[in-house]
Image: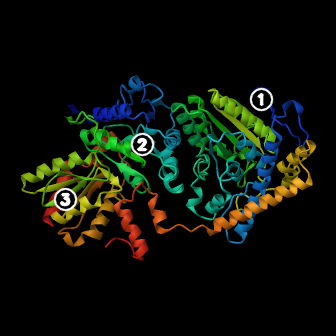
C-alpha cells in the first residue's frame, strides 16, 4: 500500500505494539490527540492509556521516566514534540540514557527510542526547525537514525525499537506528508548502522540523510541532463556511521559532496570529510565539498529560504566539483 | 496515618526517639529484637566503612569520596523496611543504603577507587547505580514505578536525594509525574542542611521541604532524620501506601552532613563549628544505642562484637577491592554499545597497538 511517512511510522508503531507487549509509547499530546503531527493517531484507542501515555509537559521527565521503564523491562518509545524542545532532557540523555550500560558494565541497559521531528521547511515558529543532529552524534552510546522516506521510516523504526541500545530517531517534518510510496504491509526491519545507495552513479558521491536525500536526488537528476552521473549515499544511521559504504562510493567516484541542513561548522559533514581525508585521500580528484546550512540561527519563515539547502545549491556544488 | 498526624505545614514532624534515646511509646514501631540489633549493626558498619574510605582517600588509595556521616539513621531507616524485590535509586552519598541492601562493600569501594565494575550489582541486589548529576535519579524511580504497575509487578521504587536536589527541575518533574500517574514510588529527601556551601535557606523559601508534596497532590511528612525509628516508620507507611495502589509519598528526613561535601571540600570555610557541635549531640547512632540499652538489647560486650565484626568486614572489603583487576582496554570500549561498531573496534586496536589514531 502507498503510505506517507506519518502513516508508515504509525503503522510501524501499531504493528510492533501488537507484536510486543513490552512496547509502550509516551509523550505530550500523543494519546487522544494522536500527536501534533498525528503520527500516533488511533493508537490510544487501540492500546489504551497504559501503553499510550499522555504525559505532563516536561521533556526531562519524559526521558527520565522512560529510563526507569526501559531498565525495568519495557521498550518505551518516547516522543519529543519538536527537536527544538528536547534540550531540557539533554541531561537525562547524555548522563544516563547513553551511559547506563557502560556505567554498570552491561547490567542495566536502556532500550529506549526517542522519536522527534526535526528540520526546516515547514514554515513554523522559532524552535520548530532545528537540525542539531550533530550534538547527538557526539554522545557515545547513542544510536542516531534519520529516515528519508516512508518505507525506510517503518523498517528503521522497527529495528530501533528492537535494538538493545538507545536510539534517537529524527523524523524530517518536511517529509512527513511530502510523498507516498509503497510500504510493505508486513513488519520488517531495516538494519541500523547500514547506509543505502539511494542512487547509483560514477562521477561523484553525494552523502546526505533525512530531508536532504530528496533534495540531493533532485539535484542529481538535473546534473544527469548535463551528463554527470551522481551517486547518492543515504546514511540512514549517523552514529555509529556506516563508514565502509561512504568510503567505497568515494573510492569509486573520486569526488565527495556532503549535504546537510544543519550548520556547517562541526557538523556531521565535518566528520565525513575527516573520514575521507583519513582513508581515501589518494582516491580524490577534487577537494571534499560541503553544501550545508549556514552557521547562524535558523531564520523565521519569511527568511527561511535563505537558509534552506535547495536543489540549486546542491547542483552548483556538483558543478564546482566536476569543474575542479 | 502518620502523614495525617504530622502536618509539615503546621510545623509538625515525626519524632519517636529523642536525642537521649527515650522513646515515644505510642509511636514505637513493633520491630523484633534481632531486627533492631541488625539495624544498629548496619549503622555502625556504615559509619566505620565511611571513616575508612576517608582514610583511604588521604592515603591515595581511594578517589574523591562523599562521606555520609550523620546520615546513618536516614539510610538504614529507609532501606531496612524494603523487600528484596523493591528497588532503590540512590545518590552519591548513600553508603548505608548499599550496605543495607546487601551490596558488597568491596564493590562499593572498588567503584569509588575509580572503577566502573564496582557499579555492576550482583544478581538480585536491586540498587541502581548512584547518580551524580543532582536529582536526575528521582524521575528514574518514578519511571520504574510506572513500569512496575504496567507489568503488574509488586515492587516499590524508592529514591533518595539531598535538600539541594529539591531545587532542580528533575525533582519537580519526577514528583509531578509520580503524582499524575500515581506510581508506587517513595521519595526520601535527606535534608542535611548543606549542598556543598549552600545552606538549606538558599534552596527554597518554603518552611519545609516535605510540604512540597502538597503541590503534587500526595502526602508529605517531615521526620527527625537522626531518629532511625522515625525514618523507618515513615518509610514503612509510605511503602504500604505504594503497595496498596495509593501512590507516592515524600519524606523529608531532617539531618546534618557531619563531614565535608567530599574529600575535595573544606566545610570550615563556610560553616560554623558550633553548628557541627550542636548536631553531634544528636548523633543518630548514639541515640539508637541508648534506646537499645533501655530495652536490654545493647551492652558493652555487644558493642565490642559489633565493632570487631565491622572492622573485619571492612578489612576484607578493602583487601578485595584493592586486589580486583583494573579495567582492560576491552572493558572501557565494550559497554558503549551492545556490540562494538567497526569504528570503535578500530580505535580499540589503535589503543592496544599504541597507534596515534586516525586509522591506517
Residue B317 appears in the rendering: yes
Between B223 and A122, which is closer to the camera in this rendering? B223
User: A231 left or right of B4?
Assistant: left
Q: Is residue A166 above or below residue B81?
A: below
Q: Residues within 10 Å of mark 1 (few under 14, many from 20)?
A: some
The circle drawn on residue B91 is none
Which tag is nearer the camera, tag 3 or tag 1? Answer: 1
Quadrant hosting residue A162: top left
Report, in whole angstroms, how far the alpha carbon at label 1 lies from the one at label 2: 41 Å
The circle drawn on residue A114 is 2
Q: Which residue is mark 1?
A: B2
Which tag is nearer the camera, tag 2 or tag 3? Answer: 2
The circle drawn on residue A205 is 3
The image shows residue A303 at horizontal and vertical percentages of: 31, 43
The residue at the point 39 percent across, 63 percent down is B344
Q: Earlier in the sequence, mark 2 or mark 3?
A: 2
Amino acid at each position: 500500500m502507498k503510505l506517507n511517512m506519518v502513516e508508515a511510522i504509525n503503522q510501524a508503531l501499531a504493528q510492533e505494539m501488537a507484536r510486543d507487549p513490552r512496547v509502550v509509547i509516551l509523550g505530550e499530546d500523543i494519546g487522544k490527540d494522536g500527536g501534533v503531527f498525528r503520527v500516533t493517531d488511533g493508537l490510544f484507542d487501540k492500546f489504551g492509556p497504559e501503553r499510550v501515555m499522555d504525559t505532563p509537559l516536561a521533556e526531562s521527565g519524559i526521558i527520565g521516566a522512560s529510563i526507569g521503564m526501559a531498565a525495568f523491562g519495557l521498550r518505551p518509545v518516547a516522543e519529543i514534540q519538536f527537536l527544538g524542545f528536547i534540550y531540557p532532557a539533554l541531561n537525562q540523555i547524555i548522563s544516563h540514557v547513553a551511559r547506563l550500560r557502560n556505567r554498570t558494565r552491561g547490567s542495566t541497559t536502556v532500550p529506549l527510542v526517542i522519536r522527534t521531528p526535526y528540520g526546516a521547511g515547514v514554515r513554523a515558529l522559532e524552535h520548530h526547525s532545528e537540525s542539531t543532529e550533530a550534538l547527538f552524534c557526539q554522545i557515545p552510546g547513542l544510536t542516531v537514525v534519520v529516515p528519508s522516506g516512508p518505507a525506510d521510516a517503518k523498517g528503521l523504526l522497527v529495528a530501533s525499537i528492537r535494538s538493545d541500545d538507545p536510539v534517537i530517531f529524527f523524523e524530517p517534518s518536511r517529509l512527513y506528508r511530502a510523498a507516498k510510496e509503497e510500504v510493505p504491509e508486513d513488519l520488517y526491519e531495516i538494519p541500523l548502522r547500514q547506509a543505502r545507495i539511494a542512487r547509483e552513479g560514477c562521477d561523484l558521491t553525494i552523502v546526505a540523510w533525512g530531508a536532504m536525500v530528496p533534495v540531493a536526488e533532485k539535484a542529481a537528476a538535473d546534473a544527469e541532463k548535463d551528463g554527470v552521473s551522481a551517486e547518492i549515499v543515504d546514511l540512514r544511521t549517523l552514529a555509529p556511521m556506516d563508514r565502509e559504504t561512504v568510503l567505497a562510493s568515494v573510492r569509486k567516484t573520486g569526488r565527495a559532496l556532503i549535504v546537510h541542513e544543519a550548520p556547517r561548522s562541526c557538523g556531521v559533514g565535518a566528520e565525513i570529510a575527516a573520514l575521507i581525508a583519513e582513508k581515501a585521500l589518494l582516491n580524490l580528484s577534487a577537494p571534499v565539498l560541503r553544501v550545508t546550512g549556514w552557521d547562524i540561527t535558523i531564520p523565521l519563515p519569511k527568511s527561511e529560504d535563505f537558509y534552506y539547502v535547495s536543489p540549486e545549491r546542491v547542483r552548483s556544488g556538483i558543478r564546482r566539483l566536476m569543474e575542479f | 496515618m502518620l502523614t495525617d498526624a504530622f502536618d509539615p505545614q503546621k510545623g509538625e514532624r515525626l519524632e519517636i526517639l529523642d536525642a537521649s534515646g527515650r522513646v515515644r511509646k505510642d509511636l514505637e514501631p513493633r520491630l523484633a529484637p534481632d531486627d533492631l540489633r541488625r539495624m544498629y549493626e548496619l549503622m555502625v558498619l556504615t559509619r566505620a566503612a565511611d571513616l575508612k574510605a576517608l582514610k583511604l582517600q588521604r592515603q591515595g588509595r581511594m578517589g574523591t569520596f562523599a562521606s555520609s556521616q550523620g546520615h546513618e539513621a536516614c539510610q538504614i531507616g529507609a532501606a531496612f523496611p524494603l523487600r528484596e524485590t523493591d528497588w532503590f535509586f540512590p545518590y552519591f552519598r548513600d553508603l548505608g543504603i548499599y550496605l543495607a541492601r546487601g551490596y558488597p562493600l568491596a564493590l562499593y569501594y572498588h567503584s569509588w577507587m575509580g572503577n566502573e565494575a564496582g557499579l555492576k550489582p550482583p544478581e538480585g541486589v536491586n540498587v541502581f547505580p548512584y547518580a551524580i548529576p543532582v536529582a536526575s535519579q528521582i524521575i528514574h524511580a518514578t519511571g520504574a514505578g510506572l513500569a512496575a504497575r504496567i507489568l503488574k509487578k509488586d515492587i516499590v521504587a524508592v529514591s533518595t536525594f539531598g535538600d539541594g536536589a529539591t531545587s532542580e527541575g528533575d525533582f519537580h518533574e519526577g514528583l509531578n509525574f509520580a503524582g499524575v500517574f500515581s506510581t508506587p514510588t517513595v521519595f526520601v529527601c535527606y535534608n542535611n542542611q548543606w549542598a556543598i556551601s549552600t545552606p538549606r535557606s538558599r534552596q527554597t523559601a518554603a518552611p519545609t521541604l516535605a510540604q512540597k508534596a502538597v503541590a503534587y497532590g500526595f502526602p508529605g511528612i517531615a521526620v527527625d532524620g537522626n531518629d532511625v525509628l522515625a525514618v523507618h516508620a515513615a518509610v514503612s507507611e509510605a511503602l504500604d501506601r505504594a503497595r496498596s495502589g495509593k501512590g507516592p509519598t515524600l519524606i523529608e528526613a531532617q539531618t546534618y552532613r557531619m563531614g565535608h561535601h567530599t574529600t575535595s571540600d573544606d566545610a570550615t570555610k563556610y560553616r560554623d563549628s558550633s553548628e557541627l557541635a550542636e548536631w553531634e549531640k544528636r548523633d543518630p547512632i548514639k541515640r539508637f544505642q541508648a534506646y537499645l540499652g533501655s530495652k536490654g538489647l545493647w551492652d558493652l560486650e555487644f558493642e565490642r562484637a559489633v565493632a570487631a565484626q565491622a572492622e573485619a568486614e571492612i578489612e576484607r572489603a578493602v583487601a578485595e577491592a584493592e586486589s580486583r583487576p583494573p579495567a582492560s582496554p576491552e572493558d572501557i570500549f565494550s559497554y558503549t554499545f551492545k556490540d562494538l561498531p567497526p569504528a570503535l573496534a578500530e580505535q580499540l586496536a589503535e589503543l592496544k597497538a599504541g597507534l596515534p589514531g586516525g586509522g591506517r
